[in-house]
Amino acid sequence: MPIPPAIEFKNVTKTYGENTVVDDLSLSVPAGKITVFVGPSGCGKTTSLRMINRMVEHTRGEILVDGQPNTGRPAHELRRSIGYVLQQAGLMPHRTIVDNIATVPVLKGVSTKEARAQALELLERVGLDRSFAKRYPAQLSGGQAQRVGVARALASGSSILLMDEPFSAVDPVVRSDLQNELLRLQRELGVTIIFVTHDIDEAITLGDQLAVFARGGRIAQFGTPEEILRQPADDFVASFVGRDRGMRRLTFASASDVTIHPLQALETPWQNWQLKVEDGKPAGWLVDGRLIPGGSLYREGASLRDALDSVLSSPSGWGVAVDNEGKLLGLLKSDDVLDATETERQRRYGVGA
Amino acid sequence: MNWLSSNLDYVAQLAALHVLQALIPLVAGTLIALPLARLAVGRRRDGRSTELSTTAGKVRRATVINSAALLYTIPSLALFVLMPLILGTSITSLLNVYVALSLYVLAMMVRSSVDAFESVSPITLEAATAMGYTPVRRFWMVELPLAIPVMVAGLRVALVSNISMVSVGAVIGIQSLGTLFTDGLRRNIPAEIIVGIVGTVLLALVLDRVLAALGAWNTRWRKA
Ligand SMILES: Nc1ncnc2c1ncn2[C@@H]1O[C@H](COP(=O)(O)OP(=O)(O)OP(=O)(O)O)[C@@H](O)[C@H]1O
Ligand SMILES: [Mg+2]
């Protein structure tokens, strides 16, 4: 028996006066997966998301949460059963971090003591030290606040998490950390996540399923990231997934076929470039007595896109491969990587061999 | 100083009366102002809505704020004299002061409470709603605590203004530190006049500091 969808939109329409913002939306959100709503600004992603926990009331149609119409019980009860992470964290400035996380359990009538104990565990779960517990939100960085926001949403004990551009206000490095941790948390807890973003890269990184929204709250395409990149349903989707489509698609191709040349095996074919190694880890390139910082590293088992990037970003033209601990494995040759993309292309269309 | 040491009990008694006449209206006026102000602010729009507030909402807000401002323009002495006529109290009754000053506090606190409620971030309120707060609980647990910093600023002005206005009551025979001033003038005792003035100033300073400290304690989260 197939797992019933966690959330189901059935012919849902939202109008503001004359304005139809979401038009006849039908969509099944699979349980235990990350579904990303992606699309250009103003196309109704946020509105669709907020109709689920009735922060916005829909005009027509029906929304089922775990099989039950979401209008079947008081809005505040529904909301306590669904985690919600806002763009600006939205923590209560007058409450300590631990009490912020404990908000929903306390609203549900759990004793403060019990709720706080659970909050402390969640604090660690989202990668923050327990010493943050007694701080106030004003004392956190944007990234830390967002982690607390995620912990607060998880504290509801809900199996459904709604996230509206939660990482858009933090810098790219922190954002990628947060994305990775979200993926880890989702795998650990098996929760259903609906994630809104207008960043197609973020959507591809996180989504098991993407719903590409077009203006007017219409779904232009629904499918896995790979399906959408491979076969955009129409010109709109093609233009939205963008010019870098070719590069993005390499995200799904494995680079395991690319040879990693051990350093010793090579007779310094890179002329006067020399790789500096410290404690077994790459530490930049030496040329004419100067040390030049290295490019991106290819971590063993990563995608072809990472392999290509390590080659393109390397000062010497040789990609640097490392293992999971960051120890040097060897070098990637640009020709090998390009050959691999060629093989990938042929395999994709089922030609050549 | 001789005058003060031999009249210490009398001064202390007047000071206590003074504090009472200043604080009771402060509390009463504020308690009436809060619901009015909250009503004037209306339903807060959420953090992202582009909707303009309705015309009805704007009219309601302007009506409440402007009537409060109008109240404040009535001269205090006139109000003290009018009170017995309206309330049927004797002219020296403390009730006159309580009611008259409550009206002033009301006038001041409506305005600053409106500002206080409007200072609360709509994003925070929206987040609270999304967590599953009921409207009533959200008001007591989130909106009101977050409005306190701006409200305390208003309370401090109202308190100091009350302390100075209580003295006016002495002119029509209501006992307070102001009595020292009128009595000193009448009987020509400069020391008594000075004690009256200095005492009032000291009282204002001390109570203002206490209120500020209470406010700061309540809002530790702001600069923690
Ligand atoms: N309360 C409202 N009243 C009237 N129109 C609204 C309201 N809220 C949203 N809209 C309109 O609905 C449309 C969809 O808004 P929505 O916020 O869902 O878009 P979005 O896809 O989340 O965009 P973004 O990526 O910019 O966040 C917009 O055109 C917006 O102006
Ligand atoms: Mg949005």
Image: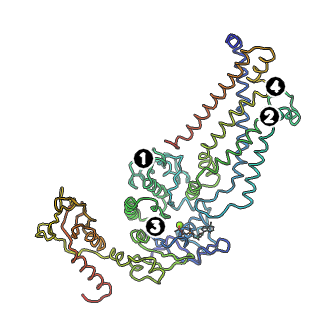
Marks 2 & 3 on one chain = no
Q: At 67% from the left edge and 44% from the top edge, which residue is drawn? A: B112
Secondary structure state at the residue bearing disc 4? helix
- Tell me: B48 left or right of B185: left
- Give percent across and percent down for residue A83: 50, 60
- Whether tag 1 and tag 2 are in contact, CB under 8 A, the answer is no
- Give percent across and percent down for residue B81: 85, 32
Mark drawn on residue B171: 4
Q: Is residue B163 visible?
A: yes
Q: Check mark 4 vs ligand 1: CB closer than 8 Å? yes or no.
A: no
Q: CA distance from mark 1 to mark 3?
A: 27 Å
Q: CA distance from mark 1 to mark 2?
A: 52 Å
Q: CA distance from mark 2 to mark 4?
A: 11 Å
| Amino acid type assigned to the residue bearing label 4 in the image | Val
Q: CA distance from mark 4 to mark 1?
A: 58 Å
Q: Which residue is mark 3?
A: A192
Tell me which chain the residue with mark 3 is part of. Answer: A
Q: Which one is in front in this view, the residue at disc 4 or the one at disc 3?
A: 4
Packing grade of label 4 (10 A; few <14, some 14-19, many >=20) is: some
Q: Which residue is mark 1?
A: A132
Packing grade of label 3 (10 A; few <14, some 14-19, many >=20) is: many
Q: Which residue is mark 2?
A: B76
Tell me which chain the residue with mark 2 is part of. Answer: B
